[in-house]
Amino acid sequence: MKFISFFRVLARKFLPGRTSVKAQSDYDAAGNGRRTLGWRVSASGPTAAAVSGLAALRNRSRAATRNNPIAAAAIDRLVSNLIGTGITPRPRGKDASLREALQFLWEDWTGEADADGVTDFYGLQALVCRTMLEAGECFIRLRPRRPSDGLAVPLQLQALEPEFVPYEKNGTNGANTIRAGIEFNPIGRRVAYWIHPRHPNDDAAGRGANLPIRVPADQVLHVFEPLRPGQIRGIPVLAPALTKLKSLDDFDDAALFRQQVANLFAGFIRKPAPEERIDPITGGLPEYDRDGFTPMTGLEPGTMQELLPGEEVEFSDPPDAGNAYPAFMRQQLQAVAAGAGIPYEILTGDLREVSDRAIRVVLNEFHRRIEERQFSFFIPQFCRPVRAAWLDSAVLSGAIALPDYHRRRGEYLRTRWAPQGWAYIHPVQDVEAQALRVKAGFASRSEVVLREGYDAELIDEENAADHERERRLGLVYSDQKTED
């Protein structure tokens, strides 16, 4: 006990302001010293952090995408890489004829999938992805249709912006809990969404009541990227970069405006002072404003402006960006690209001093992140539920006959989703590498073709048809042999 008391005395003497050694954190970032003074952070939970200021985040993200070329490029690059021409399904059943029938029916339906009649299913993928990136999330309503509507499968999809589900709505519905517009049952499962009939911020939405109505969860899809366990609403992908984007845009505009102002004045003509002061513009006596000063006249590049006798002009001389401007902008844009999750070279198109090997490393890392987003939340949250609802509607409407469907539904739903393949960096080398992988047994030809976004069976059928036509017409192409 005496030893402990002596140690505490020493601690008070040599560690002022610290009464206990245990109070000192082993991590500098957790301490309360001079370096962390004023560092205030929030302890909000995943949902509270997501909805806190969510409206401002959405509005600023959309404003940046509309007006800031870097923000617009970031969203465009992400959508084009996440979706491209579309993430397409490939049935995995054993019956080849059934796979072909399912594929034909799907292709007939994709052009009718949009409830608004603006695009097709793959266009909806891009629209949902863009909304999710720009506003943080997107909701999709499954709209069953009547057989009399004449659709290949009586189902359509309606994409909704996140404002349709008010995050301010909280409360209870019987034993269920409503959090941020989503209703959960006592075991935490989503059972319903509260959705406005019309967009609450659209002036052209029409008059009348627009109170949110309860829609069962099996009729709604919710697409967002969860960043924390338990998070139920999404945030815009540009959220970490919005402040820097705004400041950088203001700085760049100021530098551009300074260059414009600097080019407005070409020269001034001075004349000896006459007995009477003459206005050089009108040739008469000068007219003064109420404050007693001569009115200013607008100048254009190349102007030779006469001054009144005795007048002099003094220009401000603010420092320009100088030689450091390009390096400064590059550094700031690299930070914006990192915040948006896009390589700087892809965001800006600046490939100076970038070798082929370096760009391969950059693209491989970027593609890995894109594939993570595709397969971790976009396909599970959007593609698979749509496929399940489509197949149920197709069977119930009689668009396709699937034996013993109620027992074998999982088997019929087995589908491989194939995103659009990545473009070759070195076509010859890349194709040769793939051929060697197939030849060595490290990958199947079907897998290689599927990663390119195509169907190996369809390619085989097209090749067979091409070879038959060549044989029938007596055509011989290079490196090909026809058989009699």
Image (cartoon, grey):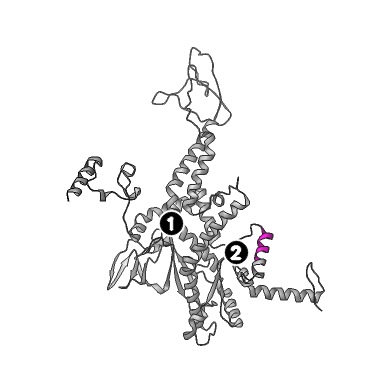
> Please, what is the dominant secondary structure of the magenta stretch?
helix
Vertical order, 89 against 310 (above or below): below
Asked whether, in this view, residue 109 is left or right of residue 433, the answer is: left
Vertical order, 450 against 25 (above or below): below
Residue 149 circle label: none
Is residue 147 shown to the viewer in this render? Answer: no
Determine which quarter of the picture holds residue 449: bottom right
Segment tinted magenta in the rendering: 424-435
Residue 236 circle label: 1
Query: Which residue occupies the extreme top position in the image?
Result: 275
Give how far across and how far down residue 272 sits, in percent: 53, 13
Q: Between residues 483 and 34, which one lies in front from this camera angle?
A: 34
User: Which badge, 2 or 1, is on the more N-terminal residue?
Assistant: 1
Q: Looking at the image, which residue is at 39% across and 58% down? A: 201
Q: Secondary structure at mark 2?
A: loop
Q: Amino acid at mark 1?
A: Pro
* Disc 2 to disc 1, C-alpha distance: 26 Å
Q: Secondary structure at mark 1?
A: loop
Q: Is residue 451 magenta?
A: no
Query: Which residue occupies the extreme left position in the image?
Result: 2
Q: Amino acid at mark 2?
A: Gly
Vertical order, 360 against 110 (above or below): above
Give how far across and how far down residue 296 sits, in percent: 47, 28
Residue occupied by mark 2: 421
Asked whether, in this view, residue 188 is left or right of residue 221, the answer is: left
Q: How many marks?
A: 2
Give how far across and how far down residue 207 sits, in percent: 38, 62
